[in-house]
Image: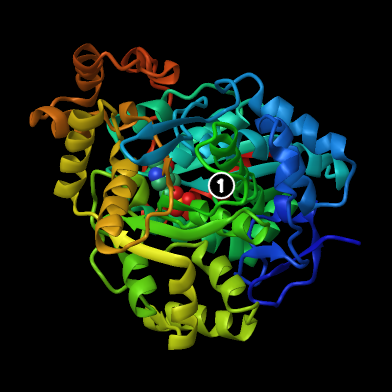
Amino acid sequence: MYKKYVSTRANQQEISFYEAIIQGIASDGGLIVPNFELEKIALEKLLKQNYVEIASIILNKFLDDNNNLIEQACNKAYNNNFIDNVINIEKVDNIYVSELFHGPTAAFKDMALSLLPHLMRLSIDKLKIKKDILILTATSGDTGKAALEGFKNVEGIKIIVFYPTDGVSQIQKQQMISQVGDNVDVVAVKGNFDDVQTRIKEIFNSHEIKDLAVNNDILLSSANSINIGRLLPQIVYYFVSYINLVNNKEINLYDKVNFCVPSGNFGNIFAAYLAGQMGLPINKLICASNKNNVLTNFINTGIYDINRPFYKTNAPAMDIIVSSNLERFLYYISNKDTELINKCFNDLKNNKKYQINDELKNKIKEVMFAGMLEEKEILTTIKECYLKNNYLLDTHTAIAYGVLKNYQNETNDRTKTIVMATASPYKFTKDVYKALYEYELDDFIAIEELNKKTKIAIPKPLQKIKDRKIRYKTVIEKDEIVNYVKNKIEKYR
Ligand SMILES: *Cc1c(COP(=O)(O)O)cnc(C)c1O
């Protein structure tokens, strides 16, 4: 009963869970996926359980190991740095909003990035790795800070975070460049998120850099959602959100629900899909995008085309054109057709686009609906929701909220729906403030003003943020990333 992992492109040998965590991306350029049938979760058993208990039950389905290690890791990850039971669900109008932003950096990425360092530590011990691990991370804003918080001062691990200079909010930037910890580094890159992510993927696929790392006793790994250890912890909050509604008698056990997810790299919504494969009763997944609507187009037409302008929007964590985790979704929805995956991603590399056939497209449409919101619509959604319900959405969550409203108007689907709230409104305060008061303020002033006017509390991790000491000022060109990493590897010795 060994649980092994393979690549979506089928050109890598089977590896264990622990090897998958350390390796990050598959050696053939594909993504690592389970090579076993996903087990169904008995929902009744989750009813009176808390977040850590549910997380342990779910994650234990992904490795053969004694229960305790994963449970200990979950306890360490979630018991101190989050609110009780980790997430909070609010009913707003006729919609359930699952607030995933009550962790150390006020974004949903905290759930996965608080656990990943513990999974990595576990894997280092299991595999008896004697080298230091270097984590390279590309961020559109939230991953970077959440990864820095998760990995700071973890023994045997170093981390470098690369962020696009103008692609993150002032608050996100301040969170990152003021990061403390002896093992962290933060670098601004002139370019957009895709520029950064592409270079980091190149590094992971470069034999030259791998050899250099080996010679310097370093192992490279990733904290992006291409890492399976980033992905799997996200399955948990779909179960927890669902069970919360059952416990509060909003739904009956086994009723189907919809989830609406603001999507970028497609990791979060893919975790929802996996939750469905593990028995969570899901009717539709609603994939919400901003103006970089490559996913909306793909789901509606079957054509994935990256030959398009890149827009910097007021929901920057979703300014992504190459959505990595879509590869894993295609692998599953096509019944593990690795030939198709290879063809698609070769086409993407060579022609900047790929197309799937109608049969597959229709299969996707059965499980998924896709829609997008323009920047102006994001602002009106925030304002309308606040005026009507006294509830404040951040720009990303507002996209999901607005796309869901459109979906409900366009279809007869009255299934109860949970919107995944991926960030606190105080992380993108400038735009949230502008949405409510039609006036633009500097982010740091907007935090105070928004708090004064709405009386909604500023999350702890964002209080007094502007007074923090800046520790990182390096700015490089996108074509310098590779050399920057090489130099670092040599210097660590
Ligand atoms: C990362 C992020 C997203 C996108 O999630 P994916 O898993 O990349 O699709 C949405 N909203 C916020 C606030 C984020 O930080």
User: Left or right of 482: which side holds 53?
Assistant: right
**Which of the pair 343/154 is nearer the observer?**
343
Residue at x 73%, y 27% (from the top left corner): 75
Above or below, 78 against 259 in this view is above
Residue at x 76%, y 66% (from the top left corner): 37
User: Left or right of 193: which side holds 243?
Assistant: right
Above or below, 51 against 469 in this view is below
Q: Quadrant of the C terminus?
A: top right
Examine the rendering and report whether any part of residue 156 can be seen. Answer: no
The location of residue 196, given as percent across then percent down, is 42, 54
**Which of the pair 66/486 is nearer the observer?**
66
**Which of the pair 65/15 is nearer the observer?**
65
Q: Quadrant of residue 90?
A: top left
Examine the rendering and report whether any part of residue 278 can be seen. Answer: yes
Badge 1 marks a residue whose secondary structure is strand
The location of residue 155, given as percent across then percent down, is 73, 29
The location of residue 112, given as percent across then percent down, is 59, 40
Q: How many marks?
A: 1
**Which of the pair 418/215 is nearer the observer?**
418
Above or below, 115 against 221 in this view is above
User: Left or right of 13: which side holds 289?
Assistant: left
Residue at x 17%, y 41% (from the top left corner): 379
Residue at x 56%, y 84% (from the top left corner): 340
Q: Quadrant of the N terminus?
A: bottom right
User: Left or right of 300: which side holds 283?
Assistant: right
Crowding at dot 1, Cα within 10 Å, few <14 / some 14-19 / many 20+, comes out as many
Q: Amino acid at mark 1?
A: Leu
Kindly identify which residue carries mark 1: 136
The location of residue 426, given as percent across then percent down, is 32, 26
